Amino acid sequence: MARASRARGNADNGRLPHRGRTAQHREMVGAFADAAGSGRGGPTPAADSTAGRGRGVPDRAYHVRGAQAHPHRSRVTFDDLPTLRAVPTVTAAQMAEVDRITAQDLHIPVEILMEDASRQIAVAARAFLGGSVSGKRIVGLVGTGNNGGDTAGALRHLIGWGARVAAEVAAPQERAHEITRVQIGRLLLVTASPVAVVHYASQSGTRDLEARAAATVTLALPKTGLLRPEASPYVGTLLLADVGIPHAAFSRIGVNTSRLFERGDLVRILPP
C-alpha cells in the first residue's frame, strides 16, 4: 500500500541509526497490511435504564447508533468507500503553498494535520486488509520527513486496533524532522517491546526504489501525476483522504474543494 504526498521529525533515547530510502512526493510504500470502550471512568448518566429516569437524562442506549452503539465496529472495505470520478488536482508547488497558508495564515499546526493524516492512513490500511487488522503483521517504512511521521503515527493507531507492527526506520536522527522523531517516540510508548517494533536500517547506503502499489492514499488533493495513465501501474487503487485543510486554504490558490468530502472523509477515486 502506498501513500501520496503533502509538505510538512525519530527517537529511542534520542538516537536512531540508518536505513535505505523512502519514496518521496508523499508516496510512502509499505506492506500496510476499536473496540469502543467506556472511556473516562465513572458511571455514565444512564448506565442502566433507571439511572436517568425521572431526571430528564436519556438512556444512551436508545440514542447511540452505528459504530458507537456496539463494541465491534462494522468492517469497512474498499468496496464500501464512496467514489468520485472527477476531482481537482494540484502541483507540488501549489500544495506547498496550501500548506503554508494553512499553518501560517490560518494557524492550524502541522501536528494536527499529521495526526489526521496518520489516522486516515491507518483507516485506509484497515480497509485494504478487509476491514480488520487484528492479529495481522504490518510493516511501515519511516523516512526522515513528514511522510515518515505520518507512517509512524499510522502504526500507532493500528496497534490500538490489534495489529502487530514493525517500523523500518530509514535514516539517522540528525536527518529526521523533529516532528517525525516525536511520532516515533509516541510509537515506542504504546508498545511493550520497542526493540521488536522499530528496526533500524543497515549502513549499506541508499538505492533507487521502484514500487508498484496495490493502493495509494493521497492527502487533501491528488497531485497531478497520480491521475496520469502511465502512473496507474504504480498507484493501484487511489484513495483520497480529508486531513482537515480548510476550503479557504485551497480557495486562495483558486481551487474549489467545498463539496469534495460530502459523502465521506475517505473516498476512492475512479479512473477518468
Image (tube, rainbow, N blue to C red):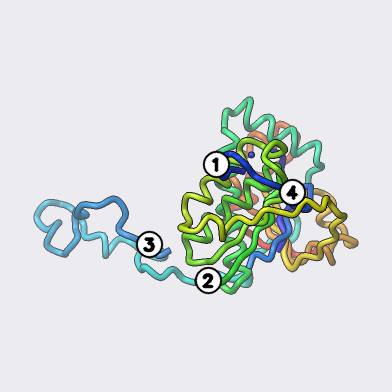
Q: Which quarter of the rendered picture does the N terminus lie within?
A: bottom right
Residue neighbourhood size for the residue with mark 2, other residues' Cα within 10 Å, grouped as few (<14), some (14–19), many (≥20): many
Residue 182 shown left or right of residue 240 in the figure? left
Coordinates of residue 254 in the picture (x, y in percent) = 75, 35
What amino acid is found at the position of numbered circle 4 in the picture? Arg
Residue 118: numbered disc? none
Which amino acid lies under the numbered mark 3 shown in the image of this protein?
Ala
Question: Which amino acid does the dot numbered 1 rest on?
Answer: Asn
Q: Residue 209 at what x, y percent from top left?
A: 84, 57
Say what secondary structure mark 2 lies in: loop
Give the quarter of the figure containing the C terminus: bottom right
Could you classify mark 3 by the number of other residues whose Cα lies within 10 Å: few (under 14), some (14-19), or many (20 or more)?
few
Q: Is residue 263 visible?
A: no
Mark 2 vs 1: CB contact within 8 A: no
- The residue indicated by pointer 1 is 13
Question: Which of marks 2 and 3 precedes in the sequence?
Answer: 3
Of badges 2 and 1, the one in the foreground is: 1
Q: Name the residue under label 3.
A: 36
Sequence-wise, the earlier of marks 3 and 4 is 4
Q: In 3D space, how far apart are the residues under numbered discs 3 and 4 (Cα atoms)?
A: 31 Å
Q: What residue type is labelled 2?
A: Ser
Residue 118 versus residue 65 in the image, above or below: above
Mark 4 crowd level (few <14, some 14–19, many ≥20, 10 Å Cα): many
Q: How many badges with numbers are in the image?
A: 4
Q: How far apart are marks 3 and 1 (CA)?
A: 32 Å
> Disc 4 marks which residue?
26
Earlier along the polypeptide chain: callout 2 or callout 1?
1
What residue is drawn where x is 15% and y is 56%? 52
> Callout 1: 10 Å neighbours few (<14), some, many (20+)?
few
Residue ID at (70%, 61%): 30
